[in-house]
Image: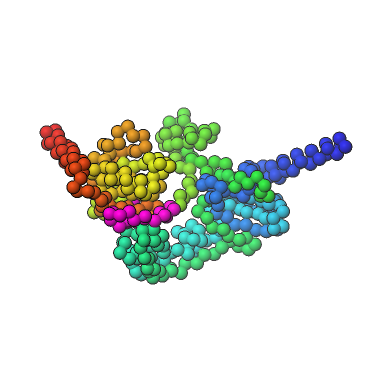
């Protein structure tokens, strides 16, 4: 019985360590699960995969692509019991090529084209018009502020995508480096990384002061910053996954306000200037402010001209940045512009102007008087300086 238990334990130890021992030493075993990029467990890496491969064949397939000019292997995942032995190779260009080399993946290749109406649209998502609400440049933004989206005419450029060669199947994604796994404890896949530092910031070249090294070797991820890269060296920031902009849930249409515009409020003739104000994502009853709470924060400011609502609440108007004081929930945002003239395209936000005010209210009169007095004092001080 003791001998049986001893052999059973040895078997378990062999299973636990088998994945690490199978690698030829060129690859680092990151852990269990398919490989993922710097964006986290849901950040899939550009790849191609094949069935009925042994792990040795998978490693060899990565080996011959380590220094590819257009397609390069940066890691692989392998599952012995999946599809007769499934091999996934990760890296830029492994998913195929586009007839237009500027497209880095299949989605970008298919999206190349032009919009006939409106001819100002630069992407297929923008090809259309939001009736009566021109601030919305995409369908999701249009619908979030109650508009009706009319599709435009998009003409494809006819670019073609050539996927990976047989027996490989392409899988296009934005990220092209391996930094982690899906962290699934019961996954049958194992992830191996070729370059343990390609997802970190790099410092390379020859330093002006030859006594200093350009290498970041031995430094933690937090220490790999531009200030620690000596003069003369080339600093390359760590690759980042795109942050998806989640569309705003929709204008709740509070009474008395102007119709919401899609995007973040902006000033200036070309809508490129941030208006003066303050911002917060913690001042609400539950942290992030609801649209109603954001509107109330605007009305509470006697000089407020409007607000942006999304992941953050931004309240705009003259002198508002000076009213933050010691309130830890709000941050002053000082800018020259004090009026809202349009919006910056951002489907995560809506911009609402025209705060309703009771013109007969004595408190409003007092508040406006205080504002005019403050403006007068500012002008007076400026003239005497």
Report the colour scheme: rainbow
Residue 100 part of the magenta-drawn span: no
Query: Horizontal placement of 161 versus 149: left or right?
Result: right
Q: Magenta segment, which residues?
A: 245-264
Q: Looking at the rendering, in which quadrant would you find the N terminus?
A: top right
Question: Residue at point 19% right, 42% down?
Answer: 362
What's the magenta bit mostly, secondary-structure-wise?
Answer: loop
**Residue 184, how many percent across, how many down?**
63, 46
Residue 348 is at least partly visible in this image? yes
Q: Looking at the rendering, in which quadrant would you find the C terminus?
A: top left
Residue 272 is at least partly visible in this image? no
**Residue 46, how many percent across, how many down?**
55, 54
Query: Horizontal placement of 205 versus 53: left or right?
Result: left
Question: Residue at point 72% right, 41% down?
Answer: 16
Query: Horizontal placement of 369 versus 218: left or right?
Result: left
Residue 247 part of the magenta-drawn span: yes
The residue nearer to you, when weighing 220 against 245, is 245
The residue nearer to you, when weighing 37 against 271, is 271
The image quadrant that residue 232 belongs to is top left
**Residue 123, how many percent across, how many down?**
40, 62
Question: Residue at point 37% right, 52% down?
Answer: 349
The residue nearer to you, when weighing 331 against 217, is 331
């Amino acid at each position: 019985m003791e001998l049986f238990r001893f052999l059973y334990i040895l078997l378990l130890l062999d299973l636990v360590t088998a994945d690490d021992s199978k690698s030829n030493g060129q690859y680092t075993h990151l852990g269990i699960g398919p490989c993922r990029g710097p964006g986290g467990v849901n950040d899939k890496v550009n790849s191609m995969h094949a069935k009925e491969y042994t792990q040795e064949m998978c490693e060899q397939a990565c080996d011959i692509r380590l220094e590819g000019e257009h397609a390069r292997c940066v890691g692989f995942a392998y599952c012995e019991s999946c599809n007769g032995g499934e091999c996934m190779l990760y890296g830029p260009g492994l998913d195929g090529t586009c007839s237009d080399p500027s497209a880095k993946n299949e989605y970008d290749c298919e999206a190349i084209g032009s919009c006939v109406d409106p001819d100002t649209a630069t992407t297929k998502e923008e090809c259309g018009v939001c009736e009566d609400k021109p601030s919305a440049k995409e369908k999701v933004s249009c619908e979030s502020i109650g508009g009706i989206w009319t599709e435009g005419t998009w003409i494809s450029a006819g670019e073609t995508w050539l996927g990976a060669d047989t027996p490989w199947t392409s899988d296009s994604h934005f990220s092209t480096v391996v930094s982690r796994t899906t962290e699934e404890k019961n996954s049958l896949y194992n992830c191996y990384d070729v370059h343990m530092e390609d997802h970190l910031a790099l410092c390379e070249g020859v330093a002006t002061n030859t006594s200093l090294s350009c290498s970041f070797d031995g430094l933690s991820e937090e220490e790999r910053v531009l200030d620690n890269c000596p003069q003369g060296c080339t600093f390359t920031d760590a690759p980042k996954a795109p942050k998806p902009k989640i569309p705003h849930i929709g204008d709740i249409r509070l009474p008395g306000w102007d119709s919401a515009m899609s995007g973040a409020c902006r000033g200036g003739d070309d809508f490129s200037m941030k208006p003066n104000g303050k911002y917060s994502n913690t001042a609400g009853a539950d942290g992030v402010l609801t649209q109603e709470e954001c509107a109330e924060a605007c009305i509470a400011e006697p000089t407020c001209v409007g607000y942006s609502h999304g992941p953050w609440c931004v309240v705009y108007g003259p002198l508002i940045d000076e009213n933050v004081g010691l309130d830890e929930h709000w941050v002053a945002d000082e800018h020259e512009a004090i009026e809202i003239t349009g919006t910056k395209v951002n489907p995560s936000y809506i911009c609402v102007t025209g705060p309703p005010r009771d013109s007969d209210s004595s408190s409003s009169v007092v508040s406006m008087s205080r504002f005019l007095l403050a403006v007068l004092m500012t002008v007076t001080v400026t003239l005497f300086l």
